[in-house]
Amino acid sequence: MFSMAVFALAIFANAAVVFAVQPGEMLSDPALEKRARTISSELRCLVCQNESIDDSDAPLAGDLRRLVRERLVAQDSDSQVIDYVVARYGEFVLLRPRFQLSTLLLWLTPVLVFIAGLTLAARAAAKPKTAPSTALSDDEKTKLSEILSGDHS
């Protein structure tokens, strides 16, 4: 019974993605529609934020899909369409931000964290594992002798 519910939920979730692009939004030219779908899969839904506009059914995502198709019909190249959308909505609209000075930290953080982790692991592995000394020093032996003999001077 549980597996049937999971299966039904999976089918429903996939159906929602399939129907995000409405039939009225699609272009009649299959080549242009394919370009529009490719571009839309690279642009972030500003409402959902973790979905592309191609996958989102938010009204703003629909507006952006129509905008992409309008620009393609106006014979803009793919990069011109993306540049146009970025100019209007900012770099945040890109699911994969461009590699530039302002996004350098974003791109390098995973590498830096990985290097820091390797460095810490190497240091931990390189540290000699010395057991604490259990032998008494000469001073400790003398004091212990005094205590045991009862001489507390």
Image (spheres, rainbow, N blue to C red):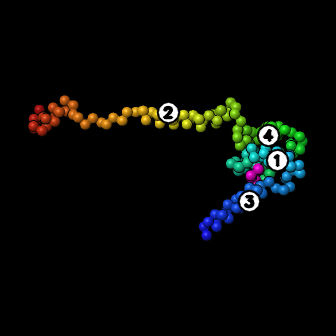
Q: Main secondary structure of the magenta part?
A: loop
Q: The residue under label 2 is which amino acid type? A: Thr
| In-front residue for pair 134/93 | 134
Q: The residue under label 3 is which amino acid type? A: Ala
Q: Which residue is mark 2?
A: 119
Q: Which residue is mark 1?
A: 34
Please tell me whether mark 1 or mark 4 is closer to you in this view. 1
| In-front residue for pair 21/93 | 21
Asked which secondary structure carries label 4, the reply is: helix
Residue 15 is labelled as 3
Asked which secondary structure carries label 3, the reply is: helix
Mark 4–mark 2 Cα distance, whole angstroms, equals 40 Å
Mark 3–mark 2 Cα distance, whole angstroms, equals 46 Å
Please tell me whether mark 4 or mark 2 is closer to you in this view. 2
Indicate the position of residue 30 as horizontal and vertical percent values: 86, 49
**Residue for point 68% across, 30% down:** 101
- For the magenta stretch, what is the residue range? 54-58
| In-front residue for pair 139/14 | 14
Please tell me whether mark 4 or mark 3 is closer to you in this view. 3
| Of the image marks 4 and 2, the number of the one nearer the N terminus | 4
Please tell me whether mark 2 or mark 1 is closer to you in this view. 1
**Residue for point 69% across, 33% down:** 99
Mark 1–mark 4 Cα distance, whole angstroms, equals 15 Å
Asked which secondary structure carries label 1, the reply is: helix
Asked which secondary structure carries label 2, the reply is: helix
- State whether residue 100 is above or below residue 71: above
Q: In the rendered image, is residue 88 in sight?
A: no
Indicate the position of residue 59 as horizontal and vertical percent values: 78, 53
| Of the image marks 3 and 2, the number of the one nearer the N terminus | 3
